[in-house]
Amino acid sequence: MASYADFYRRSIDDRDAFWAEQAQLIDWQTPPQTVCDYSNPPFARWFAGGTTNLCHNAVDRHLAERGDQPALIFVSTETDQETIYTFRQLHAEVQRMAAVLQGLGVKKGDRVLIYMPMIAEACFAMLACARIGAIHSVVFGGFASGSLATRIDDAEPTVIVSADAGSRAGKPVPYKHLLDEAIQLAKHKPKAVLLVDRGLAPMKLVEGRDQLWGALREANLNAQVPCEWVDATHPSYTLYTSGTTGKPKGVQRDTGGYAVALAASMRYIYCGNPGETFFSTSDIGWVVGHSYIIYGPLIGGMATIMYEGTPVRPDGGIWWQLVEKYKVTVMFSAPTAVRVLKKQDPAYLTKYDLSSLRTLFLAGEPLDEPTAKWISEGLKGKPIVDNYWQTETGWPILAVCNGVEPTPTKFGSPGKAVYGYNVKLLDDQTGAELTGANQKGVIAIEGPLPPGCMQTVWRDDARFVNTYWSSVPNKLVYSTFDWGIRDEDGYYFILGRTDDVINVAGHRLGTREIEEAISSHPNVAEVAVVGVADQLKGQVAMAFAVLKDAGQLDDPAAMLKLEGEVMKVVDGSLGAVARPERVRFVTVLPKTRSGKLLRRAVQAVCEGRDPGDLTTMEDPAALQQIKDLVAPVV
Ligand code: ATP
Ligand code: MG
């Protein structure tokens, strides 16, 4: 077995040979002639000239060997449904969907906007688009009409696929009227809207535009739609970033590079084998859902669980019950979900037989020590592996690659630079590379980005270059806009977003550092720290914490005492310079719908500014609490 260090080196120093080998993990109709065309940086064209198809690699390719094995396991604890589709059944459903989309006028290169709950038909629709060379654009089902309208105008879809309703905590969440409003608001009008009627909410159909999946499926039961062989560089989808730091960016992904990157990641990072079951608790509206609910596991010949429901219904054991039932070997979730489970009885974690489970992967935001410890202890020492990446990259930038060489994890670190990523730490003021250990800087990637990463911003090459590749003068490097350090062993630690770095009297601190310190207080469940302009010190840190025991929230004296305690904890671990000016207590923090803290909104409110684009915010009441707390007393 090669050492990871050698494997990594080769991926950078002998890039083309390395990726030519990985390209053999997937099927090609025409093998690529070139590996990486980087003649027009920063635009990388991976495997140009090769033709392939994502749906073929996810579905058709497995028919001969595992046609009758589970491919898609749809579980809804909202509607009490559980349906297993074998690869053969999935193949049939996808062809039905593909025939229906073609019947509605969708052609190669056309966009199809998918605004759907976590139901099997959403998976059929994504794969059907890939099959016929259409470009899907999945919009998270929780978005309201305004956000949806912007995305309709950006994607200009030929067809929109949707449903009558989603469901949350047992209550239907109607979609159709939001969709109708969005289409009204949008300048672009789709030719047709294809609707899955789940019988959850009444729908008024628009004549000549709205079509029902149920009827059209029946009419296409025996459809045979061959895969459209597309160039490796043909766009497979567009997807928006979470909008944590500003206006969401439309990420465009290719076909061949993405398939190769995912196939390789299943082997080297997630270590999932064909015939096993993968369970990602994300949503198809996010990048994790694209890469590791749909494409990655299926390309790897694994069954994938698509779960509609919360982690705590019917009880806090539901995910572990599914692990037992479907013998899940690889599980993927987010720290925010684990924090939800933390409020449940830990006995749920040991109630089921989890012997099949090898690893729980977590990604999406910093994994704090108390959360990591809680889940690791609860799962009786099963490995918890943090990994760091972005919608833009589509697969991990930082991780431990146990499929190459067993690698220990370090607490608080998502691991080392992943093969293919030439990761650098840069001084954010000068752009100079920081080569020493334990220096703080911006995490950047020298071009070309590896296969699977974004090709460009959809229809906006200039925005791609200006947003991501222009932060260092005279040097083409991709900025992640995350701030971190690397230790002497090559492990990275994320300290927060570059936007969030706090400058207190000349000391530069990542929000993550202060948050980590505060969350070690036994009564703190969750905390957000932001830098707020201060005439004297430049900036001061402000903290907003959610308490585990919120019983005394109405008692000002108790809160003042607690505030003092929390400040002491910070003094003890980081020094008085990092001590927040105030620590205030709230019942909930403002987050994006993908579960990320919206620090920019908190900061704006603290500085009395307009918080800007809040369309991706989960619960407006959370920001209101902070507004009420910081409002000047008149
Ligand atoms: P926007 O770019 O629109 O502001 P966003 O950055 O939140 O939104 P995503 O692509 O969903 O959109 O999130 C990627 C970001 O999430 C990373 O840049 C990083 O800040 C954070 N992140 C992801 N995984 C981890 C991790 N394992 N540890 C720490 N932070 C993480
Ligand atoms: Mg981002």
Image (cartoon, grey):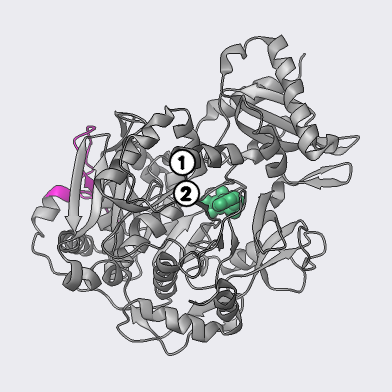
Count numbered badges in the picture: 2
**Residue 319, percent from left and from top:** 34, 40
Is 392 placed above or below 181 here?
below
**Residue 492, percent from left and from top:** 65, 58
What amino acid is labelled 2 in the image?
Answer: Thr
Residue 146 has which mark? 1
**Quarter containing the C terminus:** top right
Is 64 placed above or below 621 here?
below
Residue furthest bottom in the image: 33
Q: Is label 1 within 8 A of ligand 1 (CB to nearest ligand atom)?
A: no
**Residue 625, percent from left and from top:** 61, 23
Q: Give me the residue at 8% from left, 57% from top.
A: 219
In this rendering, would 521 be left or right of 202?
right
Is 373 placed above or below 316 here?
below
**Residue 468, percent from left and from top:** 64, 63
Please say if the residues under marks 2 and 1 sit with CB atoms less than 8 Å apart: yes
Between 264 and 81, the one lying in front of the other is 264
The magenta-colored residue range is: 191-214
Between 9 and 556, the one lying in front of the other is 9
For mark 2, what is the residue? 150
Label 2 to label 1: alpha-carbon separation = 7 Å
Is 139 placed above or below 204 here?
below
